Image: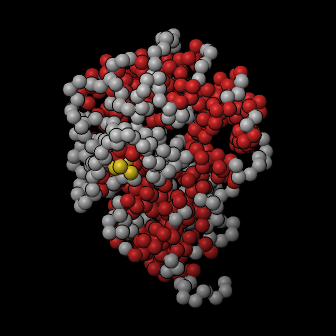
Amino acid sequence: MGAETAGRLPRAALAAALGLVLCVRDGVAQEPISAIDWLTERLRGEAQAPPADPAAEGAPAFGTLPGATPGAGILETFPEAPSPGALLPEAPPADPAPATISKTVLGAASPDAVGLFPAGDAGLLPGFWGEATRAEAIAAILPPRAYALPSLRDLYRRILTAEFAPPAGSDARGDLLLARIEALIATGAIDQAAALVAQARVGGTIPPALMPHAFDAALLLGEEEAICAEAAAAPGIARDPAFRVFCLMRRGDWRMAVLTLELSRTLGRIPPARAELLARFLDPALIEDGDALLTLPEPFTPLDFRLLEAVGEAVPTQTLPLPFARADLGGGAGWKAQIEAAERLARAGAIGHGLLFSIYAQGRPSASGGIWRRVAASAAIEAALASGDGDALGRALPEAWAAMTEAELQVPFARQYGPELAALAPEGQAGALAFRIGLLSEAARRIAAEARPASPEDRLLRALALGIDAELPEDPVARDVVLALTAPMPSAFVPPDMAEAITRGRSALALMRALDGIDAAARGDASGLAGALAFLRAVGLDRIARSAALELLLLERRG
């Protein structure tokens, strides 16, 4: 072996000091890793147009429950939904009589009040949590929700990111904030999680309790240089020894990285598989050519992902949980990998629809079928809309819709193109399809108000979008939807326990149960659907109730 690099320990001495036994495995795991235990363990370880009537779309529902505690409701106003991928939502439309938005100033009491925007910008009251305790609020948002309907996912993410007065029992520890960040990371909303961490800085420094989440988000976003620099500036915030070893090596302090790894391994503070991986990261030549790949650490973390990438043994993100898909949007991945990651994230509502279609537009399909079918279909729709050719649009739309349906990307497609499709209004069956696609967009009410559908099914959908009377259909699920959404007094359909929750200032907890009930209907159990939709209307979330109902019927997410 040639001379050792000046200033470094001999490799043999390093191997002896670390005392690592290099484990042999057959190859990188091929089955998807479905758990994201590193998040849960950390939390535990750290204890558009108006309807037929003149009422504005954001106006509170006309059915309210008697005896409700003043100021204990959920809704203030509800503007059009911002892009799920944006860190800050767009400002709501101007209101001739804007409501006063009260803000909770974050002081020394609790970081749980931290948010990315005032509650009013999300259409919710600053006192959203009402009489709920901190423990109840955490139990309401965890485990992280993977709702089947996009409208429910959008509302859930608003609840996770809005600025609310902290619930009873909140303190300087900020457990509710930790739970919100955990839920955001688990559902793929890495940018929003990183933004919440940034908002929670104290004196410009990330609180130590948030550092593990900040580190995970930074690694998934490809911002490890910045987070390591912050850890170096305030050493006490980096409690994870594996994180310290990684950052020491990134800074070029090889000797201290080795000593930190040796000491942490001896004390049992770094699992053996991760210690092995860090040893290879410190000196890849320890593993001779032809040696087997490393054993994946359990639980598998963003640090493990980046370490494997650094030593040339990258794990495809398609085999990993959803949060890891965000790493492929950082620019280093190929176009196909970026498309696959963007589709996963858009399907989960973790990024805006515009980002998905901008990635589609970056090139030309290199094959047919699968993702290339959707790339070609998107390009055909873009060309037809750009030319204003209704006939071309009529030919391209059925294929594009079939391609998006195949990947459950109907709502991102509708939000991207729905208003333009309705404006160009192709003839025949393509026109009827454009109408239905438009009802899944954020312009659903305007499109419904301007449409004159011919079929009974489409007339029913129009009535649901506008909140006007409709004939009761035979299908039991559609019947429940019509009853809940057209009743003059939706409170009559609200289950007694949810009605009591409103009167006791516990509307937020009942809201989370209502969202779970609608989600259950989307997965085949519609027993609580009418009551859950009626509850949303009773607390003023009428638009969410209608969007969820239209998605339930149009997307056929019913088991």
The residue at the far right in this view is: 367
Taking the spot 65% from the left edge, 49% from the top edge, the residue there is 358
Residue 16 relative to residue 545: left or right = right
- Whole-percent x and y of residue 410? 60, 34
Taking the spot 53% from the left edge, 42% from the top edge, the residue there is 348
Towards the viewer: 396 or 553: 396
Taking the spot 40% from the left edge, 61% from the top edge, the residue there is 198
Picture quarter with the N terminus: bottom right
- Compared with 83, 147 (above or below) is above
The residue at the far front in this view is: 96
Q: How many discs mark residues in the rendered view?
A: 0
Residue 244 relative to residue 105: left or right = right
Q: Quadrant of residue 193?
A: bottom left
Taking the spot 67% from the left edge, 25% from the top edge, the residue there is 431
Towards the viewer: 109 or 139: 109
- Whole-percent x and y of residue 372? 73, 43
